[in-house]
Every structure is written in C-alpha cells, then in structure tokens.
Image (cartoon, rainbow, N blue to C red):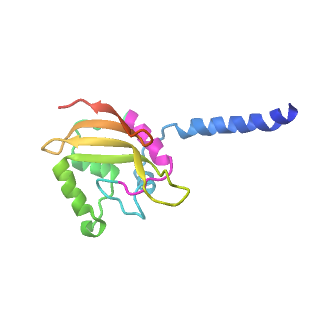
Amino acid sequence: MKIFTKYAIPILLGITFTLVSCSRPIPFNKEEWMKQGGFHGRHFINNDIFVKGNTRYRMALWLEENYNFCKKSLNEILDKFYIVPEYFELLGDSLAFERLKNDKKLRVVKRQHNPNFIFGIDPWIDINWIEIYFDKNFVVSKVYYVHYNHRTGQRTERRICPPV
C-alpha cells in the first residue's frame, strides 16, 4: 500500500493536471496560430495542410468564446487567420481562391487526426473546424463550429451566427 501511495498518487495527479491544462483556452496569437498550421510555412487559404499541436486547438477554443465572426467580411477574416502568400500560383492558392469564390465557404481547421500514425501513412482527417459561409457580397452569413467523428462518420454542427 505504501508503494501505491508513493508512486501512483503523484502520477494520477500529474495526469489529471495535464488533462485539465490541455483543454483550457488561451488567447489568440496570429504568429503562434500560423506556426501551428500549414506545411513548411505555406498556408493555403481554404484548407490547412497540416495542423499540429494542441496550441492551435486551445486558441480556437478561445476564439469560439470571444471572437465574433458575424457580419465580418472575407478580407477581415483572411487578415485575422491567414498570411496571404505573394505567389498564389506556386502555392496553389489561385485555385483555392476560385473555389472560395464559387462555394462561398471557408474552413478554418482547428484539429486533425491521423488514424495511421504508427505506420507513417498520411491520410490526415480534419476532426474539428470552423465553417464560415459568405453571402454574395462576401460578408459572413452563417458560422458553424463542426466536429467530425472519424470512427462513426457523424458530423456535429453548432451554429454561431444566425442566418441573414
């Protein structure tokens, strides 16, 4: 029993504190946000290639509670979340802008999952994201926080902005 109290209780307390601190929101910082998304400094407008770390997720939790997406323009949102590259053709962003103009939908990825991380295979699945819809003037019309359960294929949406 002494061995249990000597080793197990501190380990259990450490695990508990770690889990509690990992889900606590932290204020948004664009530089940190950009480090946690993209691939080798390349940030695609309509899709994040590789989101790493829980820092980005914790910043997104803060955004859910404190940032108002309603009635913002596309340019305001791009300025907030993305570094728009100078050479669109080299990074594939010209196609992303065309898709954004046609679909009038922007996804800001918060968290990804790789079910095959042991084998090094790279089919990353977006499991949490912010989905922003624009009207014909490219002003936000509705916003959803989306969670995708990769095991069941179920998608859960939570509407933030009411439809205009």
Q: Is the N terminus in the top left, top right, bottom left or bottom right quadrant?
A: top right
Is residue 31 among the parts visible in the rendering? yes
Q: Is residue 1 left or right of residue 12?
A: right
Name the residue located 37 percent from the left edge and 47 percent from the top edge. Answer: 109
Q: Position of residue 154 (x, y in %)?
A: 38, 37
Q: Main secondary structure of the magenta part?
A: helix
Q: Is residue 7 magenta?
A: no
Image quadrant assignment for residue 131? top left
Q: Position of residue 94 (x, y in %)?
A: 22, 62
Q: Residue furthest left?
A: 136
Q: Is the C terminus in the top left, top right, bottom left or bottom right quadrant?
A: top left
Q: Residue furthest front?
A: 152
Q: Would you place residue 26 above or below residue 78 in this image?
A: above
Name the residue located 43 percent from the left edge and 43 percent from the top edge. Answer: 150
Total numbered labels placed on residues in the image: 0
Name the residue located 23 percent from the left edge and 41 percent from the top edge. Answer: 133
Task: Name the foreground residue: 114 vs 67.
Answer: 114
Task: Name the foreground residue: 63 vs 128.
Answer: 128
Q: Position of residue 129 (x, y in %)?
A: 37, 43
Point out the stretch of residues depicted in magenta. Answer: 48-65
Q: Position of residue 14 (x, y in %)?
A: 68, 38
Q: Is residue 59 left or right of residue 7?
A: left
Task: Name the foreground residue: 156 vs 111.
Answer: 156
Q: Is residue 28 left or right of residue 77?
A: right
